[in-house]
Amino acid sequence: MNHSRKGLFPAHFKFGAATSAYQIEGATRVDGRGASIWDEFCGGKGRIRGGDSGDRACDHYFRYRQDVGLMRRLGLQSYRFSISWPRVVPNGSGALKRAGLDFYKRLLDELLAADITPFVTLFHWDMPAALMQKYGGFLDRRAAEDFADYVEVVVRALGDRVNHWITINDPFEHAFFGYATGVHAPGLRRPWSYMSVMHHQLLAHGMAVERIRNENPRAQVGIALCLTPIHPSPEGNAQKNWAASVAANEFVNFVQLDPLMRGCYPEDLCRRLRWFMPSRANDDLRRIQAPLDFIGINTYQREHARYARWVPFLKSWNTRGGAIAESEFTRDGVQYTSMGWEVYPQALSEVLSWLRRGYDNPPVYITENGAAFDDALIDGAVHDPKRIAYIAAHLIEVQQALAEGSDVRGYFVWSLLDNFEWAAGYSKRFGIVHVDYETQVRTIKSSGHWYAKQIRSHVAAHEHQETLDVS
Ligand code: FCB
């Protein structure tokens, strides 16, 4: 099979969609679920656009059957969702709630009956509030131990239904937005805690990998990392901006990849942040480097770093820090999404080339990629050509990377449904399915129909191939 042929991905390549628990489930006070840091954070004034919260979200907890029906209509081959830690262990450690686990069992049974492969994320930022109160969440290494215990419970209960596990989603954003700048839960503004929170999440990941493998030696285990190429800003001093971009890439990207894949933190970063490294960090690196079956990549855009005197790799870097655009726009012929993120599909092949060249070319899933645009529901339809163009352009980059030797095994569009977009609340729509939050009516957007067609032709191409092979 020549997968470089136009429009064709390898037979084993899976097309899916992704979501996360707090962003879609709702039902935050149902069946004994404990509070998460997001429930508490959303309660604070002025934190979430429109004063929104995930209390109801897409009501998926009650509508999961209908939602799996939608996935079936779209022909999804795989579905990535996350488990809410406080739904399963309301206090973060100790007693578990059967009802919470039962929900995920029912969801998984629906998925399996629809022949959709589940990819289950164990932590997508919804830390139990009890552990935040007890020791400050991932500020403390005890969070890694409690996380590993929770993971063991989940894998024991669901391991017969799930083979693909993703330990943690996007440790960078959780550490940076949650604990350093405070625009996400838990809302702390302690930039100096960034490295501790990052390190404890990576440790939690490493410990979780051990537990998953103990429970289920055949499991496929990975982590989902938000990787964003940061280029030097074209404005200002070129040489200084270049140095700033090198530092920023270490701070955002290689701070995750290096310990996971090489067992060390980037040297320059360690030097710069030496006062902020948690004690015992070096002793943990062996566990953090536990061999993985795949790396998940969440990539959306590229960013630019501009040198600034005091914090050369942080302050200078333009779109981070939680600034969210009002709406989509174009500037100098370049399209920006309604988050204000640059549409730059080459970001995906750049990140894949890092993994190919610098990290032994591991198997990869694109665990998130997609865009928010200013969608409108008109006469029962959402016409979203920009989202189609975005996804199509990124899939071409994936094909390009495959042709260059990357081992990409699947692609998950973010997101299946419009949902609670963290600090932006419901103001930003990433779904290939539109959600009317008042009525909870779902409408497949043009992009959803288009994506379904891509999947159908992918499947048909290989069915055809198999028939040929057989004859
Ligand atoms: C990712 C998050 C995901 C979603 C997208 C837009 O970084 O993992 O939950 O918010 O951004």
Image (cartoon, grey):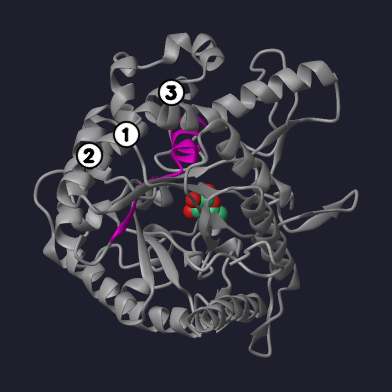
- Amino acid type of disc 1? Ala
Residue marked by disc 2: 210
Local crowd size for mark 1, using a 10 Å CA cut-off: few (<14), some (14–19), many (≥20): some
Residue marked by disc 1: 290
Give the secondary structure at mark 2: helix
- Amino acid type of disc 2? Glu
Going from N to C along the chain, the mark reached first, 2 or 3, is: 3
C-alpha separation, residue under disc 2 versus residue under disc 3: 23 Å
Q: Quadrant of residue 240?
A: top right
Magenta highlight range? 163-181
Q: Quadrant of residue 388?
A: bottom right
On whether ligand 1 comes within 8 Å of the CB at mark 2, the answer is: no
Residue marked by disc 3: 195
Quarter of the image containing the N terminus?
bottom right
Question: 294 above or below 253?
Answer: below
Label 2–label 1 contact, CB within 8 A: yes
**Horizontal and vertical percent position of residue 4:** 67, 61
Q: Nearer the viewer, residue 148 or 213?
A: 213
C-alpha separation, residue under disc 2 versus residue under disc 1: 8 Å
**Horizontal and vertical percent position of residue 446:** 66, 80
Q: Nearer the viewer, residue 236 or 262?
A: 262
